[in-house]
Every structure is written in C-alpha cells, then in structure tokens.
Amino acid sequence: MIAKQDMKKLKKGDLIYLPSEITLYKFNKDAACRQTCKTPRPMTTAFVSRDNNLCEVLYNGEIWSVLVNDIFIGGQNG
C-alpha cells in the first residue's frame, strides 16, 4: 500500500507499479462506472492524477482509474 506522504509527492508522469489482478475502472462524465478490467500481469505505468481514493493511470494508451491502495510508487512492490 502507498503511504500518504508518498502519495502527495506523486506528479503527473511519475512511474507507479500496478500488481496483477487489480481492477481498473472507466467512468462516464456523470461519474457512473461504465467499464472495468483486471491487470493481467504486474506492470509499471504513468501516474496521471488523483481524486480522493482513486488515481488516474495510463493503461493500454487510455486513462483508467484505480484505487489508491492498489498502487505502489515506481517499480517497487512493497
């Protein structure tokens, strides 16, 4: 799990680590979830932004949301 003080340091473009089998979400403009998927393998990707308990990340060339507690800073997994 990512520490609160580390979360505050993240900037757009920083690398984050996504473990395998975490759920990613896509939302409509009205904040309704319209699509989900699971990461098939662990990966490092770019951080885009944060809003409360969700982070936006780059996944397969698109912006997806993921729970803050599901990500790790950089290539570290704990």
Image (tube, rainbow, N blue to C red):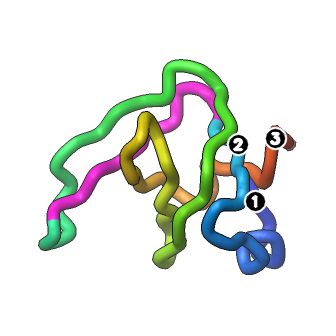
Locate residue 37, reporting x and y percent: 35, 33
Q: Which mark is residue 2?
A: 1
Locate residue 3, reporting x and y percent: 80, 66
- Which is nearer the eye, 55 or 11? 11
Give the amino acid at mark 1: Ile
Query: Residue 40, relative to residue 47: is it above or below?
Result: above
Tag 1 or tag 2, which sits nearer the N-term? 1
Q: Which mark is residue 17?
A: 2
Q: Can you tell which of label 1 and label 3 is closer to the viewer?
A: 3
Give the amino acid at mark 3: Gly
Query: Residue 6, relative to residue 16: is it above or below?
Result: below
Q: Say left or right for 56 vs 8.
A: left
Give the amino acid at mark 2: Tyr
On whether residue 73 falls in the magenta region, the answer is no
Q: Which mark is residue 32?
A: none
Mark 2–mark 1 Cα distance, whole angstroms, equals 10 Å
For the point 42% across and 30% down, the residue is: 38
For the point 47% across and 76% down, the residue is: 51
Q: Quick one: SS at disc 3?
A: loop
For the point 51% across and 69% down, the residue is: 53
Residues rendered magenta in the picture: 19-28
Q: Which mark is residue 75?
A: 3
Tag 3 or tag 2, which sits nearer the N-term? 2
Locate residue 4, reporting x and y percent: 76, 74
- Which is nearer the eye, 47 or 78? 47
Residues at badges 1 and 3 in contact (C-beta under 8 Å)? no
